[in-house]
Amino acid sequence: MGKIITIKNNKGGVGKSTLSKNIAHGLAMLDFKTALITSDAQNDSLILLGGWFEGGKGFKSFVQNGEEIKIKIRENLDYFPVETDIFGINLKSKIRNAFNSLKDNYDFIIVDCAPVFNVLNDIILEITDEIIVPIKLDKLSTAGITRLIEKAEGNKITQIVPNLYRNTKISREYFQNLSNFFNDTGVTLTNPIPESVIEEQLSEKGKTIWETQSKKAEELQSLYGEIIGGIIND
């Protein structure tokens, strides 16, 4: 039975899609059969992987009719495009069934969860096994993460990932405050992932952090490796 790992933050602009694509491809490269899904009809994760969804049938068709519409984007990695993020309340049980079907066929299902409140996201948060939260080390993000922990889904949060990190005094202070907050909570505060020109260049080319020989990418690969290790060993 596979595991659902949701990349979630109610705030946009924290690098959820980039984190999702790199985690998903990293798992696939370790020979885990991996599915990547987004709850955003813009399908940003697919675009960042060099793919494109022309429209038509997608995940909603899979939910309604069992038609498995998927795009093979890397070895061991399939993408399930979303044609719409509008799912009626009457589809709740079918959404659960669709994800259960995926868990029967994949080792990991990575969900790039859009920062919106709708039926699809509600069900995803109910059935997910783990939540990974990317954040920026600023006032709004750090305040938001403490509130998120206090909510019902807080007990599913396994890793907090400081992303797009800039090595400034205030960022270091926020990191230390979060480190103190999460001490002995069972939630891992990972090492920060720095803001990177290399990452931007790879995304423009539709590549992941694992598809470069650049020495400058080795630090990023190591940081992503720690996150993936946390998923595998949990």
Image (cartoon, rainbow, N blue to C red):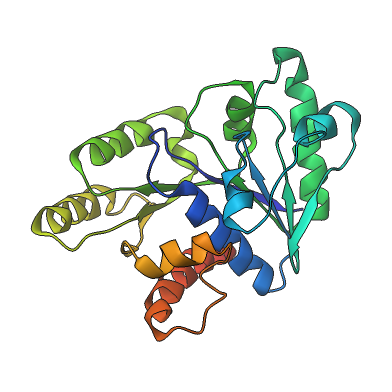
- Does residue 95 lie above or below 21 as drawn? above
Position in image of residue 69 (x %, y %): 84, 43
Q: Quadrant of the C terminus?
A: bottom right
Position in image of residue 163 (x %, y %): 34, 55
- Does residue 41 lie above or below 14 as drawn? above
Q: Residue at x 46, y 39 (%)?
A: 155
Q: Residue at x 31, y 31 (%)?
A: 147
Q: Residue at x 90, y 29 (%)?
A: 65
- Does residue 30 lie above or below 170 as drawn? below
- The part of the image, by quadrant, that contains residue 77 is bottom right
- From the viewer's side, name the closer residue of 173 and 46: 46
- From the viewer's side, name the closer residue of 82 and 169: 82
- The part of the image, by quadrant, that contains residue 63 is top right
Position in image of residue 206 (x %, y %): 58, 62
- Left/right of residue 208 with respect to residue 186 in the rendered view: right
- From the viewer's side, name the closer residue of 228 and 77: 77
- Left/right of residue 145 with respect to residue 86 in the rendered view: left
- Left/right of residue 71 with respect to residue 84 in the rendered view: right
- From the viewer's side, name the closer residue of 135 and 149: 135
- Left/right of residue 145 with respect to residue 55 in the rendered view: left
- The part of the image, by quadrant, that contains residue 111 is top right
Query: For the image shown, how many numbered marks are present on the structure?
Result: 0
Q: Residue at x 40, y 70 (%)?
A: 198
Position in image of residue 23 (x %, y %): 55, 61
